[in-house]
Image: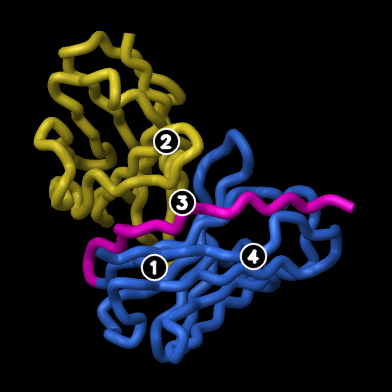
Chain colours: A blue, B yellow
């Protein structure tokens, strides 16, 4: 059974960089069968896809966040990470990592437990 | 931009059929997936590829798509189905796009 376990601080100061990590168990990022995404959800609001990474390191970002988001992968640890720079209060959200299917129907079939990240001084 | 429009809320009586719609100008060009999110929990995939159900998802969940509208149907709705539901497509320019979500109330 695939599991995604997220880690990272719950509080970030404005203008700083948010950093989160997602560790995958029950499957290998190296398999190349999936993308690995980050998705966020502001409190009381809907879901927003941030971007994904492939095991090779290739990435694809939501154009609205492309200038601030960086996703990286460490296949030796079976982990992938998100950095979001220059955060403001508007970036306060629950962040999720998710396994992302490839092919004609791209969807998110396994999700991490979520991390609430609050941007506040 | 690519917008997916869902009704903010839908109400259904227990045992009845609930239908949640998702509309978008280019919806017919994309496969639609649906997610259920219980309060305080991570979303769960309930339908993908318009009509396919992941293993472990009850048969009462079904999906359809015609033209610019996709529909998630829950037959014999149970109290445990009360949740937020989101549709999602993949756009080659924008990546993952979600609808605004629909709160399903079972009363």
Neighbourhood count class around disc 2 (C-alpha, 10 Å): few under 14, some 14–19, many 20 upward: some
- Rendering coords of residue A112 (x, y %): 44, 58
Q: Quadrant of the N terminus of chain A?
A: bottom left
Cα distance between the residues tagged 2 and 3: 10 Å
Cα distance between the residues tagged 1 and 2: 19 Å
Q: Are marks 2 and 3 in contact (CB under 8 Å)?
A: no
Instruction: Residue B5: give its label.
Output: 2
Query: Which chain letter goes with mark 4?
Result: A
Cα distance between the residues tagged 2 and 4: 33 Å
Cα distance between the residues tagged 3 and 4: 31 Å
Neighbourhood count class around disc 4 (C-alpha, 10 Å): few under 14, some 14–19, many 20 upward: some
Q: Is residue A47 above or below residue A100?
A: above
Cα distance between the residues tagged 4 and 1: 30 Å
Residue drawn at 68 percent across, 53 percent down: A117
Cα distance between the residues tagged 3 and 1: 11 Å
Query: Which chain letter goes with mark 3?
Result: B
Q: Secondary structure at mark 2?
A: loop
Determine if marks 3 and 4 fall on one subunit: no
Callout in the foreground (2, 4) = 4
Callout in the foreground (4, 1) = 4
The verdict on residue A104 being magenta is yes
């Amino acid at each position: 059974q695939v599991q995604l376990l997220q880690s990272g601080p719950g509080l970030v100061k404005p203008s700083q960089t948010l950093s989160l990590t997602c560790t995958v168990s029950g499957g290998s990022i190296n398999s190349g069968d999936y993308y690995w995404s980050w998705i966020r959800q502001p409190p009381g609001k809907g879901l927003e896809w941030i971007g994904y990474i492939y095991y090779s390191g290739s990435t694809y970002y939501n154009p609205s966040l492309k200038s601030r988001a960086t996703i990286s992968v460490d296949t030796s640890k079976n982990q992938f990470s998100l950095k979001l720079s220059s955060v403001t209060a508007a970036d306060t959200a629950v962040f999720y990592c998710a396994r992302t299917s490839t092919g004609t129907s791209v969807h998110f079939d396994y999700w991490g437990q979520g991390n609430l990240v609050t941007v506040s001084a | 931009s690519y917008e997916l429009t869902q009704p903010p809320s839908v109400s259904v009586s227990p045992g009845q059929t609930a239908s949640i719609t998702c509309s978008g100008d280019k919806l017919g060009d994309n496969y639609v997936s649906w997610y259920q999110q219980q309060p305080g929990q991570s979303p769960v995939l309930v339908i993908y590829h318009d009509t396919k159900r992941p293993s472990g998802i009850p048969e009462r969940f079904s999906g359809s798509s015609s033209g610019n509208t996709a529909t998630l149907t829950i037959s014999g709705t149970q109290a445990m189905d009360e949740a937020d539901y989101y549709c999602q497509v993949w756009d080659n320019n924008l990546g993952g796009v979600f609808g605004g979500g629909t709160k399903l109330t079972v009363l």
